[in-house]
Image: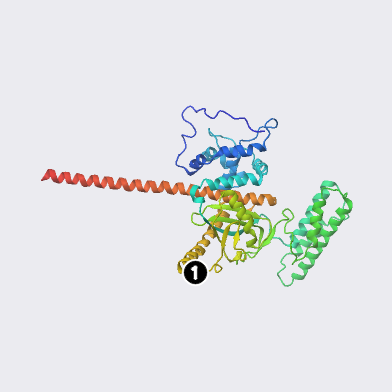
Amino acid sequence: MLSRKHDSDQMSFYSTFEEQLNHKHSLYILANQVRWQIFEEAFGKHYSQTWGAPAKPIRLMVGLLILKHLRNLSDESVVGQWVENAYYQYFCGEKVFAAKEPCVPTELVEFRKRIGEEGIELILQKSIHINGKDAQDKDGLIDTTVQEKNITFPTDTKLHKKIIKRCKEIVSKENIELRQSYTKTVKKLSMEQRFRHHPKNYKKAVKADRRIKTIAGRLVRDLERKLPPSTKYQTDLELFKKVLMQKRHDTQKIYSLHEPHVQCISKGKEHKKYEFGSKVSIINTKDTGVIIGAINITKNDYDAHTLLPAIEQQQRLTGHVLKNEIVDRGYRGIKNVLGTNILIPNSVKAKTTYQKNKLRKAFRRRASIEPRIGHIKSDHRLSRNFYKEMVDDNINVMLAAAAMNFKRMMNKWKQQRFIFVDSLSKLLIEFFSLNIYFKKLLVRKITF
């Protein structure tokens, strides 16, 4: 149920909470620039008007989601720091400084599920609109990257051990008696798997790998026999069998039991040959650097095949069609998508030297999207995705992009403030220097 509205016009004895803050702080300015009423109207439909416990204010939950990715914090950290930070509280709509936590961290999980991808896309859209004319560039830059999932580096032996562990958990929950638990055997085999790169231990380690795989298969088959056909663990058992059947060079392999949709993606990096997660497409304005599109690609598609969903999202968010999209050679094969020209190096034949130089500058400018992607990863939680399931992958991408856009405007306001202070100081220096000059002239006239 929606929360009741409280009287927020009541003043404290000395001054209001708003008057105690620095009005030039970037978070204070951002809080007054965002149109919070749009989120309340859009997300109010997800709440009941008649029954249920009163929910947390929508502005509070949206503000916490933005702050989380803006400051690169976890759910627990952003809730904990909210109590200590007055600007966080003002950004989330508080009128009086609060001394207790605003919500339980798991409520952020429920709120993300409640508003879904549609609601997160609205937050991204408003982050684009807050950049004003800077987001209306006629040309764009596009590139793909990988957001890694929060999983360990996958090996067959790790997966087989996890299958054994999960089977024992099911046994303890359902009170099933196994033919053999293999607890001591698995512990002994794990010790034999160590130091496998030593020539004397390699054969013993490989033999232990095969033995652990055999034990995992036995436990799965034993559970299949003793559980009813319509059991709730049927999908888990099917997943276990698929992992046990897959081989090294198979396609569509499973790399994690709790995240089975994870893809193995190779981007040709020297320091990291393979990355395990999902592909992400980022669209950036050519001259201003505003992110006008960020979407998660569910499959490990060829880069050119990611253009259609990415440009569809960009046109949905901005409401206008870009004239050109400048890409690298990984997008070969497509020249036009939904009215937008795709410019690839060495594929466009220019007639004049002026056009050649213009295209050369545009292709050089394309490289500016690379550091921007690096900042999204390092500063706004795109480097490692801690959200679960495929739907939350897209949520993480859009929230990171929205945080990047908000951060851009905050930096711009800071820069404008410093420029104003510098210009004011220069004017004051000139004024005092002129004042001293005129005083000297007056002294000379008096002496003469």
- The image quarter containing residue 254 is bottom right
Decide: few, some or many residues near mark 1? Use Cα within 10 Å; few <14, some 14-19, many ≥20: few
| Position of residue 446 in the picture relative to residue 361 (left or right) | left
Residue drawn 82% across and 54% down? 237
| Position of residue 14 in the picture relative to residue 69 (left or right) | left
Residue drawn 45% across and 66% down? 354
Give the position of the N terminus as an image quadrant: top right
Place of residue 226 in the rendered image (x, y in percent of width and height, measured from the top left): 89, 51
Place of residue 444 in the rendered image (x, y in percent of width and height, measured from the top left): 14, 46
Would you name the residue on which mark 1 appears?
351
Residue 425 seen in this snapshot: yes
- Image vertical order of residue 338 relative to residue 104, above or below: below
Place of residue 146 in the rendered image (x, y in percent of width and height, measured from the top left): 63, 58
- Image vertical order of residue 269 relative to residue 294, above or below: below
Residue drawn 72% across and 62% down? 155
Q: Amino acid at mark 1?
A: Lys
Q: Residue at the far front: name it.
A: 351
Residue drawn 80% across and 62% down? 245
- Image vertical order of residue 3 relative to residue 203, above or below: above
| 266 and 324: which is toward the camera | 324
